[in-house]
Image (cartoon, grey):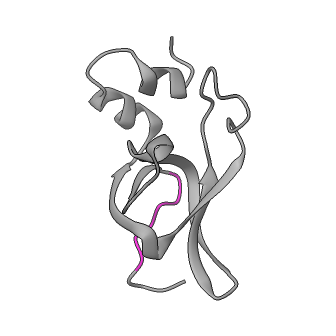
Amino acid sequence: MNQQLPDFSGKVVVLYIGAAPAAIQNGVVLEYAEFRRYGGRLVVVGRQPHVPGSEWTSNVESGVAWDEVVHWVVFPTREAFLARVPAPGLWWRLFGRT
């Protein structure tokens, strides 16, 4: 796509949205993220990992409008992401390590 865009392929990305609703103020975690255009708007699309208690959004495609993203964090692998999590908790449950 555009050379100016980050490469999220094969990585875990946490996207933070400006003026985010409470449900996603801690960021949106996506695996297999890529950029697509929908209705002329650039969107980051990927799969939300499994979250116990939120099965209705687990392992489904999700997208965030790129122009709404104010910050992002990229981890090269799932293991690298989990290594940064200080103790088992929500992030570990996201990736099935309870």
Q: Residue at x 44, y 43 (%)?
A: 22
Q: Nearer the viewer, residue 16 or 30?
A: 16
Tell me how many marks there are. Answer: 0
Q: Residue at x 52, y 60 (%)?
A: 9
Majority secondary structure of the magenta segment?
A: loop
Left or right of 53, for residue 19: left
Q: Is residue 27 magenta?
A: no
Q: Is residue 54 depicted above or below 67 in this figure?
A: above
Taking the view exactly as shown, the residue that stands out farthest to the top is 98
Left or right of 2, for residue 40: right
Q: Quadrant of residue 7?
A: bottom left
Q: Nearer the viewer, residue 39 or 14?
A: 39
- Image location of residue 52, percent across then percent down: 62, 21
- Image location of residue 37, percent across then percent down: 65, 80
Q: Quadrant of residue 44?
A: bottom right
Q: Is residue 6 magenta?
A: yes
Q: Which residues are magenta?
A: 5-10
Q: Is residue 20 depicted above or below 29 in this figure?
A: below
Left or right of 55, for residue 98: left
- Image location of residue 96, percent across then percent down: 57, 20
Q: Residue at x 38, y 83 (%)?
A: 4
- Image location of residue 82, percent across then percent down: 38, 29
Quadrant the N terminus occupies: bottom right
Q: Residue at x 61, y 43 (%)?
A: 48
